[in-house]
Structure formats: structure tokens, C-alpha cells
Image (spheres, grey):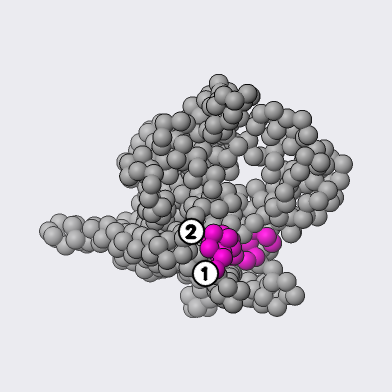
């Protein structure tokens, strides 16, 4: 991806269509008085509108459907209350008739810490407190998706991305759960937006160190998100994509800033994590970076009874004699590695089942609420809601690779046979994959997700622009798939990537990038794309 040599020329203004150019204030409005000010405030008002609508929908869903926290939510809520009461992330144990403080780190602390702030501020007696916290996180995520989309898409498409996230029924229903996936999604998408936004607003001749500020700020947010979901750290190296490639002849010099940014991102992402790691080393029975469920999860995904989804581990499976959480995690980790080394083919053979459990349907929210209030979810209602949520999710999955497939009509007018053939073949392939996915005996859509993750990086003729605002959400989806291919799958885990799916769906079938370089790879192109807003 190269930088254009003259972003201000009239020809370049024409090359950027309504659907490919990022949004910005038009140069022709500069100096026109109140109009530029009002224009600059439009995104703010729209983001606030998304936030208000999204919060109302999520809080209403919580008031209508929520019950007591169940499954992992019970432990998250209990941990949050303990933190708010000043006991830290812990419980109490009675040993020889004496109550002893017992520290935790099996689950990541971040979500409980987030809820604890609201319990501390508002009191821990109201069941509505976590619903308020979750509603705020979900609403902020909708606004952030819109703002991130504006960094790579037209205003119209950016608004569509925000609306899709706001009205997504699975994300709305998730507001009634005491679970951390939406908070995790918010932290990762915010990190992406901050990294791109701060990098884009730098002066053209800023030094390399100054250019790292956006990457460093995004990495700090990503590190905080890793306390909710440690897999967020896998996204850190890719924050370097926020930096444009330098306009130099030497390949080494052109890529050097991104190489430096990769190191900066990895270092800064650890800054919010390491104090918690130090706490674990001090109070636990050993050191743990964030939590002690990685070994547990690896064993679930590899032991003889593994099916590709959650299965309960028993002492009879292994690890009979353990005393602490860190020791237990390491025991299960070694047990899982031993199973993989003994039968690598079986472990690899479970990957399709793991990805299917993760991506092919959406039912966790319904099952969670049914567990909490069984009488409110008779079988007919349960099946209907699961089917509706799954249908919306599958539509987004099929649309996601289309973010990297060009609209054919502009290609046809420009008479580009290679581009027309390539993009036409991709469109047919996506359509065929969607048909095969739904018509299979067991509907199968995860290959489409993997296809989108690969297609984003292929420099095929006639493809649309692939700005960082699209590539980084793909990174979130890809790292989610990788994580659960290694461990085990459950449809709850794709909720972290659902805002990314919404953004990609809004980017589907854009005009081709006719200039041979990504329109949004540089800061200057934002000025050239003024007419799109």
C-alpha cells in the first residue's frame, strides 16, 4: 500500500466515490462561518443519538428479561461486590473454624472491576446496577463503531455501521446478562479508533516518536481491555497498521515506522496488565499474567472427552492433588499439552467443531436468561428467539467478506477485464458459500468468516480500499477465531467480534480503489474525500 503523490488534484477528487472516501469537513466550507462548525458537530450529535437509543434499548431489555446472574456471571458479580466492599478480588474460606481471606485470579478481573466501580458508586443492593453498567458499555460501543467507521468509510456507511450495532438484537439482549463480552468489544474497538484517530491528526512532518502517540494510546486501552479478555493482547502488534507507510524508495525505510510501532504497541499494552500480574505473584500461589483459566480451557479443548465446546473437567480426568489456582492451571495446561502431543490429529480435527460452536449460531443470551428465569422462556419462545438471533448473525457473517469485494458496475464502466473477472468471481464465491452454508444438513458459516479474514489482505485486482479502520476489525475477528480454534468454542465468544461484523457489513460492495493505493492509507486523502460527507 503506497501513498498517493498528489492528493489534492481534481482527478483524485473524482476517483474517490461516495462509498469509498472517509468523511471529513469539506475544504470548500472552510471560512464560511457557522456552516463548518455545524458540519463538524454533526458526527457528535449522531454519536450521541446512537448512544441514547442504544442505552435505552439495552437497559429496557435488562428490565424486561434479566434474572439473577448465572453461570460465569454469578462469579463475575460476586467478585465485583467483593471488590466494591473493599475485600479485593477474593472470597472467604473457613479453615479450622477461622475465616481466612482467599484471593482469586481464575477469571480475568477486568469485568468484575468494571462492575465494582458502579457498585461502589451506587451501592450493591440494587439488581439494576449491573444492567446500568452493561447498558452504558453497549451504548458506548455503538458510538465507537460509528466513529471508527468514519475513519475509513463514507458518512453514510459509517452511520449504517453504527445503526447496525445499535439495533443488533443479540447485543441488545446481552444488556440483560452479567457477562463481559460487550465490555471487551468496547475496549478493543476503542483502542482501534484512538490509534487511528490520533495518528491521522498528526502534522505531516511529525517525528517518528511523535507518530507513535496514537499507537501507544491505543495499546494502553487494549491493555486495559486485556484485564477483561486476555486475548485482546493478540491485537496489539496490529495497531501498527494505523501508521501509513512512509513514502521512501527503500522497502526497509518504508516499513521501519510500522516495525517500531509494533514494538511500542506490545510494550504499552502490557503497562495496564503488569500491576495486576505483580499482585498475582504477591498473593497467589504463583505468578499469573492475568488469570488462571488458560490451562483449564486448553484441557477442555484437548482431553479425551473433548467435543469442541465446553465440557466439565473432573478430578478423575487429571490434576487430583492441587492446592492453589495457579498450580491447578499449570497442571491442566500440562495435561492439555500432553493430550495434544499424544494425539495431534484428533486435536486438529476438533477445530471445525470449535469454530462451528463459536460462529455458526447465536443462542447464549437466550440460554442464560432461560437458566435465570425458566418460567419466562417456554420452549416455543426459546426456539423463536434463538432462530431470530441466529438469522441476524448469519446475515452479518455472509456480508463480512463483501467488505473486500467491489461493486461491479463501476468496474464495468471502466472496462477493466481483470478486475471485473476477479471481483465477479469473488461475489459469486461469497454467494455460493452462503448458499452452501445454509443448505447444509448442519448450517455451516465459519468458513465464510475465515474467508473474510484472508480476503482482507489479498491485493486482488479491482478490490475496494482496505484502510486500517477495516483491517483492524478483521484482526479482532481473526484473533477470536484463532483463540477458540486452540481452546474450545461457544457462541458467546463471537459477541466480542459482533461490532466488527457490523462495521464490515456496512462496508460491503464499495466501489473499487481505482488509484492503485488505499484511499485512506494517508492523512491527505481525507481532505480529498470531502464530498462524500
Instruction: Report x, y in % for residue 95.
Output: 62, 25
Give the quarter of the image for residue 427.
Answer: bottom right
Q: Is residue 257 left or right of residue 374?
A: left
Give above or below for 106 relative to 355. above
Label 2: few (<14), some or many (≥20) within 10 Å?
Answer: some
First in sequence: mark 2 vs mark 1: 2
Q: Is residue 105 visible?
A: yes
Residue topped by disc 2: 67
Name which residue lies at 73% across and 71% down.
442
Q: What is the quadrant of the C terminus in the image?
A: bottom left
Magenta stretch: residue 288 in it? Answer: no
Instruction: Name the one closer to the observer, 395 or 529.
Output: 395
Whether residue 359 appears in magenta in the rendering, the answer is yes
- The residue identified by callout 1 is 376
Q: Nearer the viewer, residue 279 or 379?
A: 379
Q: Secondary structure at mark 1?
A: helix
Left or right, residue 420 beside residue 174:
right
Q: Residue at x 53, y 76 (%)?
A: 408
Q: Is residue 293 above or below residue 7?
A: above
Residue at x 54%, y 34% (from the top left corner): 91
Against 111, is 325 above or below?
Answer: above
Indicate which disc residue 419 carries.
none
Q: Main secondary structure of the magenta part?
A: helix
Measured as percent of width and height from the top left, residue 98 is found at: 57, 24
Q: Are marks 2 and 1 in contact (CB under 8 Å)?
A: yes
Viewer-closest of 498 and 247: 498
Measured from the top left, where is residue 492 in percent x and y?
58, 57
Picture quarter containing residue 145? Answer: bottom left
The span picked out in magenta is 356-375
Residue at horizontal 74 percent and vertical 45 percent from the top: 313
Mark 1 nearby-residue class (10 Å; few <14, some 14–19, many ≥20): few
Q: Secondary structure at mark 2?
A: loop
Amino acid at each position: 500500500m503506497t501513498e498517493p503523490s498528489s492528493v489534492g488534484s481534481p482527478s483524485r477528487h473524482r476517483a474517490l466515490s461516495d462509498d469509498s472516501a472517509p468523511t471529513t469537513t469539506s475544504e470548500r466550507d472552510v471560512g464560511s462561518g457557522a456552516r463548518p462548525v455545524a458540519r463538524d458537530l454533526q458526527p457528535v450529535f449522531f454519536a450521541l443519538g446512537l448512544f441514547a437509543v442504544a442505552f435505552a434499548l439495552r437497559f429496557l431489555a435488562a428490565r424486561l428479561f434479566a434474572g439473577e446472574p448465572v453461570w460465569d456471571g454469578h462469579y463475575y458479580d460476586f467478585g465485583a461486590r467483593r471488590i466494591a466492599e473493599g475485600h479485593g478480588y477474593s472470597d472467604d474460606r473457613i479453615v479450622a473454624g477461622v475465616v481466612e481471606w482467599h484471593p482469586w485470579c481464575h477469571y480475568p478481573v477486568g469485568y468484575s472491576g468494571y462492575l465494582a466501580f458502579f457498585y461502589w458508586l451506587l451501592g450493591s443492593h440494587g439488581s439494576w446496577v449491573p444492567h446500568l453498567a452493561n447498558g452504558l458499555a453497549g451504548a458506548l460501543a455503538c458510538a465507537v463503531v460509528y466513529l471508527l467507521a468514519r475513519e475509513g468509510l463514507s458518512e453514510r456507511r459509517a452511520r449504517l455501521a453504527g445503526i447496525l450495532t445499535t439495533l443488533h438484537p443479540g447485543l441488545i439482549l446481552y444488556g440483560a446478562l452479567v457477562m463481559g463480552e460487550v465490555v471487551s468489544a468496547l475496549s478493543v474497538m476503542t483502542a482501534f479508533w484512538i490509534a487511528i484517530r490520533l495518528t491521522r491528526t498528526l502534522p505531516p512532518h511529525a517525528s517518528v516518536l511523535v507518530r507513535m502517540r496514537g499507537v501507544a494510546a491505543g495499546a494502553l486501552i487494549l491493555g486495559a481491555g486485556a484485564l477483561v479478555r486476555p486475548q485482546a493482547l493478540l491485537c496489539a502488534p496490529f495497531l501498527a497498521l494505523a501508521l501509513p507507510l512512509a513514502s521512501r524508495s527503500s522497502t526497509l525505510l518504508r516499513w521501519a515506522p510500522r516495525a517500531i510501532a509494533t514494538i511500542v504497541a506490545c510494550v504499552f499494552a502490557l503497562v495496564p496488565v503488569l500491576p495486576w500480574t505483580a499482585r498475582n505473584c504477591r498473593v497467589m500461589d504463583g505468578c499469573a499474567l492475568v488469570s488462571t483459566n488458560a490451562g483449564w480451557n486448553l484441557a477442555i479443548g484437548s482431553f479425551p472427552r473433548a467435543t469442541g465446546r465446553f465440557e466439565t473437567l473432573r478430578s478423575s480426568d487429571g490434576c487430583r492433588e492441587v492446592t492453589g489456582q495457579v498450580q491447578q492451571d499449570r497442571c491442566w495446561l500440562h495435561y492439555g499439552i500432553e493430550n495434544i502431543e499424544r494425539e495431534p490429529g484428533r486435536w486438529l480435527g476438533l477445530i471445525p467443531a470449535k469454530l462451528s460452536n463459536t460462529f455458526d449460531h447465536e443462542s447464549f443470551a437466550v440460554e442464560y436468561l432461560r437458566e435465570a428465569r425458566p418460567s419466562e422462556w417456554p420452549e416455543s419462545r426459546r426456539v423463536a428467539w434463538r432462530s431470530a438471533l441466529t438469522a441476524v448473525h448469519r446475515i452479518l457473517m455472509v456480508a463480512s467478506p463483501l467488505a473486500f469485494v467491489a461493486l461491479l458496475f463501476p468496474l464495468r464502466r471502466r472496462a477493466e477485464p481483470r478486475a471485473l473477472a476477479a471481483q465477479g468471481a469473488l461475489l459469486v464465491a461469497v454467494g455460493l458459500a452462503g448458499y452452501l452454508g445454509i443448505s447444509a444438513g448442519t448450517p455451516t458459516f465459519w468458513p465464510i468468516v475465515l474467508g473474510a479474514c484472508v480476503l482482507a489482505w489479498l491485493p486482488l485486482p479491482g478490490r475496494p480500499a482496505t484502510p486500517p479502520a477495516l483491517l483492524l476489525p478483521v484482526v479482532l475477528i481473526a484473533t477470536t477465531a484463532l483463540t477458540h480454534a486452540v481452546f474450545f468454542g461457544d457462541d458467546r465468544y463471537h459477541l466480542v467480534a459482533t461490532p466488527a461484523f457490523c462495521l464490515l457489513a456496512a462496508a460491503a460492495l464499495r466501489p473499487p480503489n481505482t488509484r492503485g493505493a488505499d484511499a485512506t492509507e494517508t492523512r491527505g486523502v481525507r481532505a480529498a474525500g470531502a464530498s462524500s460527507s
